[in-house]
Amino acid sequence: MASAAVLRHQPAVHSSNFIIKANTTRRISSSLRLVVRAAAGNTEKMAAEKMGIKIEKNPDESKLTSLGWGCPPSKFPWTYDSKETCFLLKGKVKVIPDGESDFVEFGAGDLVEFPKGMKCTWDVTETVDKHYKFE
């Protein structure tokens, strides 16, 4: 039985089949578990787990920060000890490879690869959030 929960701006979650108080966990069926918790400002959050897969709606900012890298506007040298692939979620960057007078600029929505051994300067012109992987 997979019931869709309707979130309300009240201390309970209502559905046609159940009511769950805020800050509780209930097993809805053998394979679906809903976790509802009230947050500051009376905004409710929900996590569902089915077959070992957990989906969290409106996760805390602290959880998201640990999944990637962020940087405010700044300028700094960087050396790639291994190949990096990154995807910018937001922001804008100019990268100036050492020994070059030109730069490469990229921003939110771009998937970028940097070769192993590259030395460069990062000029972050708009605050960056990115996902990345080193190989």
Image (cartoon, helix red, strand yellow):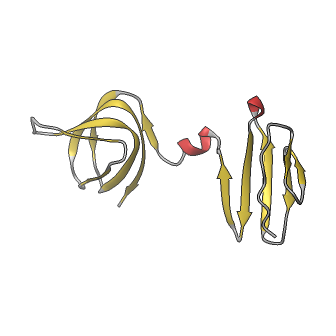
Res 16 → quadrant? bottom right
Q: Nearer the viewer, residue 44 or 99?
A: 44
* Residue at the image position 74 percent from the left and 36 percent from the top: 43
* Residue 93 x %, y %: 29, 36
Question: Looking at the rendering, in which quadrant would you find the N terminus?
Answer: bottom right
Give the residue furthest to the front: 16
* Residue 45 x %, y %: 73, 44
Question: Looking at the rendering, in which quadrant would you find the C terminus?
Answer: bottom left
* Residue at the image position 71 percent from the left and 71 percent from the top: 51
Please count the marks in the image.
Answer: 0
Tell me: 88 left or right of 42. Answer: left
Using the image, determine if residue 61 lies above or below residue 13: above
* Residue 85 x %, y %: 33, 55
Using the image, determine if residue 27 lies above or below residue 5: below
* Residue 67 x %, y %: 52, 49
Using the image, determine if residue 65 lies above or below residue 55: above
Tell me: 37 left or right of 75. Answer: right
Using the image, determine if residue 62 lies above or below residue 73: below
* Residue at the image position 75 percent from the left and 31 percent from the top: 40
Tell me: 66 left or right of 55. Answer: left
* Residue at the image position 64 percent from the left and 41 percent from the top: 60
Tell me: 49 left or right of 28. Answer: left
